Image (cartoon, helix red, strand yellow):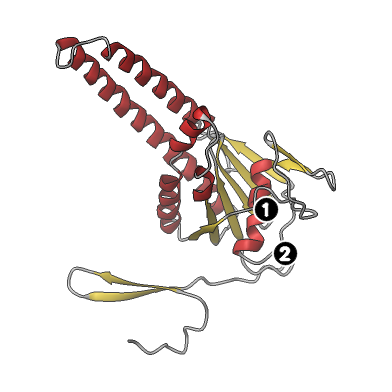
């Protein structure tokens, strides 16, 4: 038990770390700076919404948003599943332990390793786009929603396969690691109900397609960006307006200039 020091008055994170000789107590504090152009908001923060069609959607509290496409990863996963099905169909006609049976097994292992490398590369590049975007806009805190509840319901054979291949846990780990290297505070939590609520009137509606349309007030906006806007009151206790500027990027391309 350690006494609380007088300078430790705000929320902080404490961790006991072994440095090779003895234990050290590391205390992390987030300093908030006052910006005269922030309209009363003393900290620049952002929320991240992970998905399948769009790898990540970032919404800041200063009117900017970023959408990173995930269609490339989705295509690679679908192609890999088709290749595995074709190989398994050929192996079912072979005698177990035969030369052709072993040859097809090696081909399956090679395709799987290549698939993992390609997916890992695109995932790292997509998260790098998110962190660079936050650095460019001076973000100090990032909240990433945990979409664990979205995988619990049965939604058909094909959609269940896509959901089972959704590795959002790795996205959260990569975001935590890269944010720590960039000196940005990052934390996660429940996001239930944020994608089905209108940011203008609060009406709940399950949208179809990528454009969110509210049947009550007529609001229209990007579906993933709507979820990011609704996460700000949940994570930071502040209501932010819908972003006026949305930047669309693909993780596999190298764009010149600032990241939006």
The answer to whether 5 appears left or right of 100 in the picture is right
User: Mark 2 highlights which residue?
Assistant: 37
Q: Residue 13 location, x and y as percent? A: 43, 72
Examine the image and state in which quarter residue 212 appears: top right
User: Which quarter of the figure is the C terminus placed in?
Assistant: top right
User: Which quarter of the figure is the N terminus placed in?
Assistant: bottom left
The answer to whether 202 appears left or right of 16 in the picture is right
- Using the image, determine if residue 97 lies above or below residue 160: above
- Using the image, determine if residue 208 lies above or below residue 26: above
How crowded pointer 2 is (Cα within 10 Å; few <14, some 14-19, many 20+) is rated as few
Could you tell which of marks 1 and 2 lies nearer the N-terminus? 2
Q: CA distance from mark 1 to mark 2?
A: 20 Å
Q: Residue at x 47, y 44 (%)?
A: 127
Q: Residue at x 49, y 34 (%)?
A: 160
Q: Which is in the foreground here, disc 1 or disc 2?
A: 1
State if disc 2 and disc 1 touch (CB < 8 Å). no
Q: Nearer the viewer, residue 15 or 41?
A: 15
Residue with the most extreme right position: 217
The answer to whether 16 appears left or right of 77 in the picture is left
Q: Residue 199 location, x and y as percent? A: 74, 53
Q: Residue 235 location, x and y as percent? A: 59, 63
Q: Nearer the viewer, residue 200 or 151?
A: 151
Which numbered tag is attached to residue 42? none
Marker count (numbered): 2
Examine the image and state in which quarter residue 33 appears: bottom right
- Using the image, determine if residue 81 lies above or below residue 144: above
- Using the image, determine if residue 218 lies above or below residue 99: below
- Mark 1: secondary structure: helix
Q: Residue 70 location, x and y as percent? A: 53, 34
Q: Residue at x 36, y 14 (%)?
A: 86
User: Mark 1 highlights which residue?
Assistant: 229
Q: Residue at x 54, y 45 (%)?
A: 150
């Amino acid at each position: 038990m350690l006494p609380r020091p007088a300078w430790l008055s705000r929320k902080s994170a404490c961790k006991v770390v072994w440095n090779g000789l003895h234990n050290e107590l590391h205390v992390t504090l987030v300093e908030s700076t006052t910006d005269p152009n922030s309209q009363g908001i003393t900290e620049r923060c952002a929320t991240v919404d992970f998905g399948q069609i769009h790898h990540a959607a970032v919404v800041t509290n200063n009117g900017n948003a970023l959408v990173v496409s995930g269609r490339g990863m989705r295509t690679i996963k679908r192609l890999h599943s088709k290749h595995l099905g074709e190989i398994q169909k050929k192996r079912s006609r072979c005698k177990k332990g035969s030369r052709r049976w072993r040859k097809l097994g090696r081909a399956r292992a090679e395709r799987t390793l290549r698939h993992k490398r390609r997916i890992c590369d695109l995932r790292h590049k997509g998260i790098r786009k998110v962190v660079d975007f936050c650095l460019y806009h001076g973000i100090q805190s990032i909240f990433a929603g945990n979409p664990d509840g979205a995988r619990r319901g049965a939604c058909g054979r094909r959609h269940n396969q896509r959901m089972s291949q959704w590795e959002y846990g790795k996205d959260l780990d990569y975001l935590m690691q890269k944010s720590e290297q960039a000196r940005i505070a990052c934390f996660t939590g429940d996001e239930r109900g944020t994608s089905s609520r209108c940011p203008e009137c609060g009406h709940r509606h399950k949208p179809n397609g990528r454009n969110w349309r509210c049947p009550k007030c007529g609001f229209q906006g990007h579906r993933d960006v709507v979820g990011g806007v609704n996460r700000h009151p949940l994570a930071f206790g502040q209501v932010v307006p819908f972003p006026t500027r949305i930047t669309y990027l693909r993780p596999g391309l190298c764009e010149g200039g600032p990241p939006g």
